[in-house]
Amino acid sequence: MKKSTSWEHVGDWYDDLLRDEDTYQNKVILPNVVRLAALKNGMKVLDLACGQGFFSRAFADAGAAVVGTDISAKLIAIAKKNVSNAKFFVSPAHRLEMIQEHSLDAATIILAAQNIENISEVFKEIQKKLKPGGKLLLVLNHPAFRNPGASSWGFDEQAKKQYRRIDAYMTESKREIDMHPGSQKKITTVSFHRPLQVYFKTLANAGFQISRLEEWVSHRESEKGPRKEEEDRTRREFPLFLCIEAKSITER
């Protein structure tokens, strides 16, 4: 049986998670995405795989005309309750019939591309909906440093250095991820690892040109202790997130 990549079964958990003000979504990703999107009143923005509407709400509050889509009916139902000034649709990521071609100023895929299997079809569909020069902001768990099942933290006691261990990078993979390790009830989703060149090549083949790349680190600090200084140093050295800005350059 094929494992679903939908977050239908984790909707309530994810909604509760994002109500915490100290999340990476709130402290790191949101301010950077808003900055790069350069939102203006009336801009037409697609929040693809919008989940329960966390980013859609911020975009709409900034004056954008926002459409949010997600394959999970449960998450879209939560989004409609959370956000009154945006439109939401239940839809797979590669099917955007509700959006007119070449009508969007911008689109975002935030921490969702790693949960989407047919990413090539998705990029092609978004490209058709963007105006020429319209931008796609793709935010990923950094694939060079975060590969589920093949990356981890280590500490060298002799050198007193924390390090990031990477056991695989170039090989694409698909893994089941426990979203809440240690809890009695196991909550899982499916994640796809892809090296950077896959994203760059797939975007280019879909009619995009990479216009910006940024890497974002954690905002958090360790509690006082013998490893605090080193742990905080490595937080600044190993980025958690990668943002790719790609502009639509051709009509297909």
Image (tube, grey):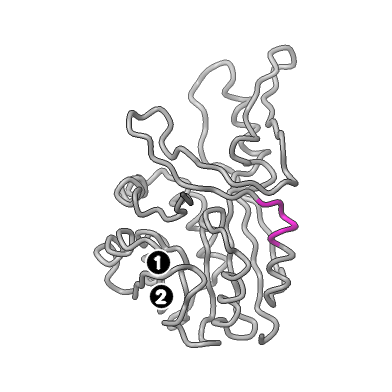
User: Residue 210 or 93: which is nearer the viewer?
Assistant: 93
- SS state under label 1: helix
- Give the percent coordinates (x, y) of residue 175: 56, 43
- SS state under label 2: strand
User: For residue 70, which quarter of the picture?
Assistant: bottom left
Name the residue: 51% across, 28% down: 222
Q: Residues within 10 Å of mark 1 (few under 14, many from 20)?
A: many
Name the residue: 49% across, 40% down: 177
SS majority, magenta: helix
- Give the percent coordinates (x, y) of residue 189: 45, 46
Among the two numbered marks 2 and 1 on one chain, the one whose residue lies closer to the N terminus? 1
Left or right of residue 222, residue 202 in this image: right
Name the residue: 42% across, 77% down: 64
**In the image, residue 252 above or below residue 22:** below
Cβ–Cβ below 8 Å for labels 2 and 1? yes
What amino acid does circle 1 point to?
Ser
What amino acid does circle 2 point to?
Val
Magenta residues span: 194-199
Name the residue: 43% across, 40% down: 179
Q: Residues within 10 Å of mark 2 (few under 14, many from 20)?
A: many
Residue located beneath label 2 in the image: 66
Residue located beneath label 1 in the image: 56
User: For residue 168, which quarter of the picture?
Assistant: top right
